[in-house]
Image (spheres, grey):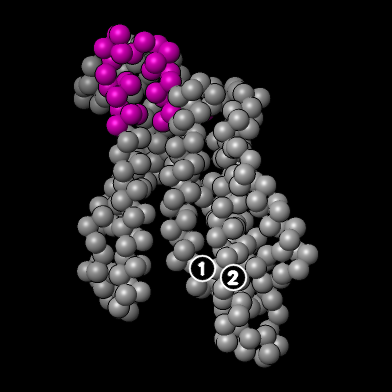
C-alpha cells in the first residue's frame, strides 16, 4: 500500500519531461528485452527472405538487399546497443562511486594515489584509444567486450564528483558521531554517505548509458566498431556500405537513424526531467 502511494505521489509530482522520458525509455526496453525474445529467424543470416521487399505483413519494415528482415535486425541492434549502454553505465557508476568515496574518506596517500589515477583517465583523450582498441578487436569483439572497453573511461568523472561530495560531507557532525560510536570507514560510507549518493548515482547512470550508446554508435558510423557486432551504429554503417540510399531502401537506413535519435531524445528527457524533479523536491 505504501509503495502504491509513493508511486502515485511520484507520478503526480513528476514533470512532463520525466514522464515522456520514462514512457519512451520503457518502450525501447520493451523492444530490446521483451520483443527481442519473440520467436523469429536469425536476422544476421543472408537471404532468409526475398531481398529488397517493401514493408508487408511478414516483413514489417521490408528486407535488405541481402534478404535480411529489417525489423528484426533493428530489434537485435536495439538490444545490443542498450546492453552496451547499461553495462558501461553500471560499471562506470559502481566503480566511480566506490573509488570516489574511498578516496574522499580515506585521505592521505590513498586519496593522492586514487586522485592521480582518476585525473589521468580524465585528461587522456579517450577517442584515439577507443579507435585503436576497436581496430585491434575488429571482427572478433563481443557485446560484452565492447562494453568493457568503453567502461575504461566511464568511471573517472563520476569518481571525481563523488570524491568532492565525500570531502564536503566528511566534516559534518553526523559523520563524526558515527566515527566516535566505533563505526569503521567502510561502514560509515555504506550506512551514512551512500544513501545521499544514490540519487546522484541514478542520474549519472542514465547519463552514462546515453554517452556509451553515443560512443559506440559514433565508432560504428566511422567504420571502427567490431564488424560482427549488431548495433544501431553498425546497422547504419552496413546500410551505407550497401548503398541503401541510392537503392532507395529508406527503411533500411532510416529505421536505425530514427531509433537512435528517439532513444537519445528519450534518455535526455529522462535525465533532465529527473534532475528537475530532484531540484523541485529539495526546494520543498
- Looking at the rendered structure, the number of numbered marks drawn on it comes to 2
Q: State the residue at coordinates (41%, 30%).
A: 232
Magenta includes 53?
A: no
Q: Position of residue 19 (x, y in %)?
A: 25, 57
Q: Position of residue 136 (x, y in %)?
A: 66, 25
Q: Residues within 10 Å of mark 2 (few under 14, many from 20)?
A: many
Q: Where is residue 4 in the image (x, y as percent from the top left)?
A: 29, 73
Q: Where is residue 216 in the image (x, y as percent from the top left)?
A: 49, 34
Q: How crowded is mark 1: few (under 14 residues within 10 Å), some or many (20 or more)?
A: some
Q: Name the residue under label 1.
A: 197
Mark 2 vs mark 1, CA separation in Å: 9 Å
Q: State the residue at coordinates (57%, 40%).
A: 150
Q: Quadrant of the N terminus?
A: bottom left
Among the two numbered marks 2 and 1 on one chain, the one whose residue lies closer to the N terminus: 2
Note whether residue 140 is visible. Answer: no
Residue that extends furthest to the right in the rendered view of this protein? 109
Is 257 rendered above or below residue 123? Answer: above
Q: State the residue at coordinates (68%, 57%).
A: 115
Out of 69 and 191, give the one closest to the viewer. 191
Q: Mark 2 points at which residue?
A: 166
Q: Does the residue at mark 2 contact the one at mark 1 (Cβ under 8 Å)?
A: no
| Marking on residue 264 | none
Which structural element holds mark 1?
helix
Task: Please give the range of residues in magenta.
Answer: 229-258
Out of 228 and 93, give the one closest to the viewer. 93
Note whether residue 145 is visible. Answer: yes
Q: Is the magenta stretch mostly helix, strand or loop?
A: helix
Which structural element holds mark 2?
helix
Amino acid at each position: 500500500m505504501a509503495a502504491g502511494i509513493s508511486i502515485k505521489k511520484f507520478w503526480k509530482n513528476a514533470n512532463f519531461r520525466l514522464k515522456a522520458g520514462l514512457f519512451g525509455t520503457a518502450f525501447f526496453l520493451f523492444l530490446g528485452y521483451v520483443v527481442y525474445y519473440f520467436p523469429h529467424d536469425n536476422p544476421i543470416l543472408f537471404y532468409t527472405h526475398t531481398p529488397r521487399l517493401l514493408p508487408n505483413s511478414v516483413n514489417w519494415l521490408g528486407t535488405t538487399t541481402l534478404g535480411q528482415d529489417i525489423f528484426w535486425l533493428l530489434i537485435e541492434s536495439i538490444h545490443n546497443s542498450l546492453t552496451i549502454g547499461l553495462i558501461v553505465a553500471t560499471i562506470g557508476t559502481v566503480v566511480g562511486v566506490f573509488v570516489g568515496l574511498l578516496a574522499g574518506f580515506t585521505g592521505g596517500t590513498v586519496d593522492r594515489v586514487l586522485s592521480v589515477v582518476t585525473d589521468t583517465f580524465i585528461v587522456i583523450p579517450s577517442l584515439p584509444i577507443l579507435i585503436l582498441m576497436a581496430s585491434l578487436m575488429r571482427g572478433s569483439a563481443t557485446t560484452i567486450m565492447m562494453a568493457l572497453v568503453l567502461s575504461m573511461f566511464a568511471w573517472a568523472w563520476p569518481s571525481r564528483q563523488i570524491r568532492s561530495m565525500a570531502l564536503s560531507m566528511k566534516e559534518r557532525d553526523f559523520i563524526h558521531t558515527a566515527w566516535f560510536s566505533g563505526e569503521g570507514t567502510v561502514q560509515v560510507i555504506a550506512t551514512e554517505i551512500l544513501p545521499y549518493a544514490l540519487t546522484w548515482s541514478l542520474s549519472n547512470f542514465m547519463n552514462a548509458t546515453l554517452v556509451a550508446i553515443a560512443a559506440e554508435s559514433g565508432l560504428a558510423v566511422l567504420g571502427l566498431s567490431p564488424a560482427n557486432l549488431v548495433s544501431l551504429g553498425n546497422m547504419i554503417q552496413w546500410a551505407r556500405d550497401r548503398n541503401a540510399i541510392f537503392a532507395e531502401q529508406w527503411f533500411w537506413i532510416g529505421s536505425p537513424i530514427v531509433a537512435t535519435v528517439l532513444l537519445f531524445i528519450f534518455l535526455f528527457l529522462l535525465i533532465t526531467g529527473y534532475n528537475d524533479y530532484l531540484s523541485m523536491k529539495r526546494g520543498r
